Image (cartoon, rainbow, N blue to C red):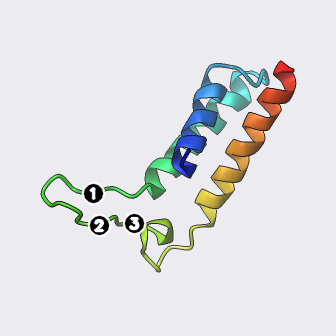
Amino acid sequence: MTPTEEIEDAARKLSSGMLGTGPNLDIPLAKLLREAAALHTPNECDKHVNCGPFGCEWCGDEDWPCADIRNALAVARAVVRSINTVAS
């Protein structure tokens, strides 16, 4: 599973209420995770083959420190661990 997939998986689980903390935390946190993943996920344009990703260090741009994607991934992993603990 890629880091982006991990983040999106955690966001889906939060949105479905699996963590059980309620919509006051789950929905905004899921939105934050989704937006971090979307902002920092490499994209290719539709006009060129292998045109390359743009946007942040995660995507190869040295102007952006990419701590937010690493932090989002850490939060996503913590969410999934918490959900797995609650489910056990």
Q: Which residue is mark 1?
A: 44
| Mark 1, other Cα within 10 Å: few <14 / some 14–19 / many ≥20 | few
Residue 81 higher or lower than 16, as above or below:
below
Seen from this angle, which residue lies furthest bottom? 62
Q: Identify the image quadrant of residue 83.
A: top right
The location of residue 13, given as percent across then percent down, is: 64, 26
Q: Residue at x 39, y 58 (%)?
A: 42
Q: CA distance from mark 1 to mark 3?
A: 11 Å
Q: Which residue is mark 3?
A: 55
Q: CA distance from mark 3 to mark 2?
A: 10 Å
Question: Which tag is nearer the camera, tag 3 or tag 2?
Answer: 2
Closer to the camera, 35 or 53? 53
Asked if the residue at tag 1 contacts the one at tag 2, i.e. Cβ–Cβ closer than 8 Å, the answer is yes
In the image, which disc is placed on residue 52?
A: 2
Secondary element at tag 1: loop
Secondary element at tag 2: loop
Seen from this angle, which residue lies furthest front? 1
